[in-house]
Amino acid sequence: MSVKGTLIPIGGNEDKGNGENERYTLEYIENGILSRVVRESGGIDATIIVIPTASSIPVEVSENYLDAFNKLGCKNVHVMDIRERKDAKNPEFLELMKKADCVMFSGGDQSKIVKYIGGTPLDKIIKNKYENEEFVIAGTSAGAMCMSEEMITGGGVQEAFTKGAVRMGKGMSFIPNFIIDSHFIRRGRFGRLAEAMAKFPLRVGIGLAEDTGLVIKNRNNCEVIGSGMVILFDPRRLIHNNRDAVPEGSPMSITNLKVHILANGDKLDIKEKRIHISPIHLEMTDAETL
């Protein structure tokens, strides 16, 4: 299905212009991910909605985003503090979302986004705008993970790649063919995304490092942005996958899981099944991604 909107999933800890630790920030916020979100939304006059539902500290998170977007010159940024499902039916919120150019979901617990927003009138407006308008859905950490149809809800790295270590649930279904994980490098989440691939071998796994994201247009054309890496798992041609044969808690084995490591400026053309590498523009025609 063709859509007019843009998805921007982010791996967490994107530069907001207020960090002191260089590991988490680009040199200038003007060159960072949030600046790209603003540009994709139409510039500093765009109406941007911040939804901190996933966070346990929504007020603090909202203030951080308001400050960050203000530093970028944005003039029309609003917060929708949705803490109960009834809030997603608030007529004022619904009217504001109809006028929005971008919605930004914060980090926290992705299941809360689905619980309080999924299937509500607000969700229907967001999806309608995404499908029919040049509308941006951005999300960081939990806000990125909730975008997929099959969503990772939890799972520790200590039991990585034992059956049942990753917990799955239904996401917001903005994009059906990906399963997205965040904080992928720093928190060592290779194993849990690999198990998700074993459970859903027709999906493509996206592991986003911190301060790293994807700009996804028409559910097809993807560009890596930010300072880190995107790990792409393609399980479509697994030769061996014993997940269904072993009991819960047992180690699993799969073979022929393709892995691609991509960085800023690299592009995926899912329809044409190609990866375009930047900056040397090396085209890998055999890197099938979907």
Image (tube, rainbow, N blue to C red):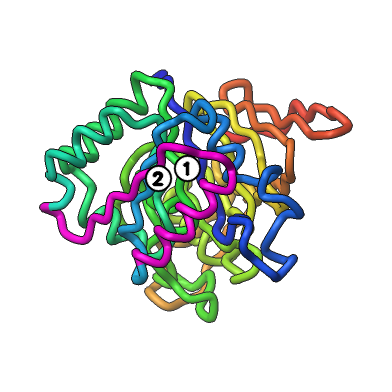
Measured in 3D between alpha carbons, the distance from the residue under mark 2 to the one under mark 1, in whole angstroms, is 9 Å
Expressed as whole percent of the image width and height from the top left, the position of residue 168 reads 35, 60
Expressed as whole percent of the image width and height from the top left, the position of residue 55 reads 36, 65
Apparent side of residue 158 relative to residue 94 in the rendered image (left or right): right
Magenta residue span: 58-86
Q: Are marks 2 and 1 in contact (CB under 8 Å)?
A: yes
Expressed as whole percent of the image width and height from the top left, the position of residue 110 reads 36, 59
Which secondary structure lies at badge 1?
Answer: strand
Which secondary structure lies at badge 2?
Answer: loop
Magenta stretch containing residue 69, yes or no?
A: yes
| Farthest residue, direction right | 280
Q: Which label was assigned to residue 147?
A: 2
Quarter of image, res 97: top left
Q: Badge 1 is on which residue?
A: 178
Mark 1 closeness class: few <14, some 14–19, many ≥20 residues within 10 Å: many
Q: Which kind of residue does numbered mark 2 sit on? A: Met
Above or below, 153 against 117 in this view is below
